[in-house]
Amino acid sequence: SHINNLFDGVEKKFQYKMRLVYAHFPINATITNGGATVELRNFLGEKRVRIVNMLPGVKVEKSAGTKDELLVTGTDIDLTSR
């Protein structure tokens, strides 16, 4: 199963779509370091900036077609899904 996932990841890449969902405080996500880091601002109205570092081999980017959507892609399903 793991070996099949590795082959599938190299051939097709695994992709997860995440939406920034909010009711009152709009969440602002900034992607830095070439897709290796995400900075979340105004999460639940906080002033503090939350920094999320991607694992090795995982990239994040903003969706071009959908507002407030992040695309997380990588070849290893275990690292991409964390």
Image: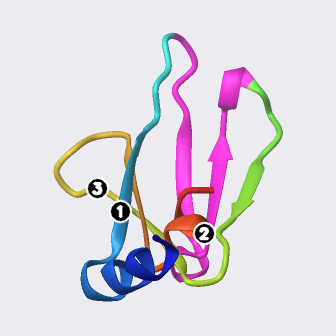
Residue picked out by circle 2: 79
Task: Tell me the crowding category of disc 1: few under 14, some 14 to 19, or many 20 or more residues within 10 angstroms, Cα based.
Answer: some
Helix, strand or loop at label 2? It is helix
Q: Residue furthest right?
A: 48
Name the spot of residue 19 as percent of width and height, x first. Answer: 41, 37
Q: Which residue is mark 1?
A: 15
Does 24 sit left or right of 16 as displayed?
right
Q: Secondary structure at mark 1?
A: strand
Look at the numbered discs 2 and 1 and tell me whether their residues touch, using CB distance below 8 Å: no
Query: Compared to 73, does 8 lie above or below?
Result: below
Type of the residue with mark 3: Ser
Q: Which residues are magenta?
A: 24-45
* Residue 63: assigned label: 3
| Residue in view at x 58 percent, y 66 percent | 78
Where residue 39 appears, x then y in whole percent? 66, 55
The residue at the far front in this view is 1
N-terminal-most mark, 2 or 1: 1
Q: CA distance from mark 2 to mark 3?
A: 20 Å
